Amino acid sequence: MDKRTANCVEKVQCEGDRLLMMKLKGKLVDMCIIQVYLPTTKHSEEEVEDMYEKIEQLLDDETKGKDYTVVMGDFNAVVGEVKEDGYVSHYGLGYHNDRGQMSVDFCKRRQMYIANTWFTQDRRRRYMWTKPADTGRYQIDYILTKCRYWISVCNAKAYPGADIDSDHNPEVARLRVKLKKVLEATVRKRWHLERMKDEGTAMNYRCEIDTAVVAEKQESADVNGRWEHLKSTVIKAAELTLGHKTTEKVRKPWVTDEMTEKRWMKKRTEDVNTYVKKHTFRGRRRRRFRIDTEVCCVGAHPPFWPLEPARVKPN
């Protein structure tokens, strides 16, 4: 994960050794990615149903209706090459089994579709797991996204030529999602040193330091320990007596409230994402600006050109 994406991480939650959830801040909607590893065929059906219940509980607790949700990982199921409504297409691999039916039922309940079965790919781009001794190839890893954001998935396929020490091929999907640009603001705290001009404040500060120094002399410690104790004492005394400066936003004297409001309206217009709303807001802003301009300009300045005298007709 690159640094910009890491700054967008809002929450990471781990549910045992089979579920991992990560929430990212998006520009329009937030994104929730859930990595799953469902039990293999050696486990009972009850354990698989419990895992699906945990996934649904995690979705209900941590996601909202508009969140861009992605559930991906090893489902240990085969959905096959048969198209079923709008959830599974015929670009899968293999034959449908019972675990695959459980995955399809989960998609129907949560209104999600299996993205890597909807793109025309060669068979070598569909399988994700190779059986020992290369006796079989199966498609058991899937990427599930919401049906609401159908057109946001550009492509999804496997990469069988990846140089990794695993019997699984990596599954990669390309999505059109804009993450929020998060800037880390470093605020430097400054002490309110002007309060030291007050004799009472200065006396309290000195008393706090002297009391701590006398108490420190009675304790036996090494040089580093004494320095850390003195440093913490000075900081605590400054917090009690001086405090930090409150940074106020400086505004130039010629900036009026109307200018600030119009700037806020322009910023709000840029945030509106739909075409109709944006042009409606812009028209409202233009009308407001025209009315203000007419009110301010009427009678504001006399004409700067001299008025010509009226011509009189000769008799």
Image (cartoon, rainbow, N blue to C red):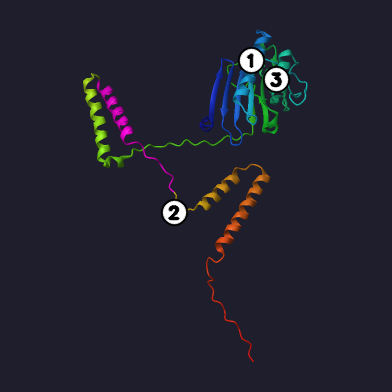
Q: Are marks 2 and 1 in contact (CB under 8 Å)?
A: no
Could you say where residue 51 lies in the image, as x and y percent from the top left? 64, 15
Q: Quadrant of residue 194?
A: top left
Amino acid type, mark 3: Phe
- Per the rendered image, the range of residues in magenta is 222-250
| Label 1 vs 3, first from the N-terminus | 1
Position of 165 with respect to 190 (left or right) is right
Residue 102 versus residue 95: which sits nearer the camera?
102
Amino acid type, mark 1: Met
Quarter of the figure with the C terminus: bottom right
Q: Disc 2 to disc 1, how far (Cα)?
A: 62 Å
Q: Nearer the viewer, mark 2 or mark 1?
A: 2
Q: Which residue is mark 2?
A: 253
Q: Disc 3 to disc 2, how far (Cα)?
A: 61 Å
- Using the image, determine if residue 139 lies above or below residue 194: above
Residue 132 appearing in the image: no
For residue 51, which numbered disc appears in the image?
1
Amino acid type, mark 2: Pro
Q: Classify mark 2: helix, strand or loop.
A: loop
Q: Are marks 3 and 2 in contact (CB under 8 Å)?
A: no
Using a 10 Å C-alpha cutoff, classify the residue at mark 3 as few (fewer than 14 neighbours), some (14 to 19) or many (20 or more): some
Q: Classify mark 3: helix, strand or loop.
A: helix
- Using the image, determine if residue 118 lies above or below residue 51: below
Q: Nearer the viewer, mark 3 or mark 2?
A: 2
For residue 136, which numbered disc appears in the image?
none
Q: Which residue is painted at 60% across and 46% down in the image?
A: 269
Q: Classify mark 1: helix, strand or loop.
A: helix
Q: How many numbered marks does the figure carry?
A: 3
Q: Which residue is mark 3?
A: 106
| Label 3 vs 2, first from the N-terminus | 3
Could you say where residue 242 lies in the image, as x and y percent from the top left? 32, 36
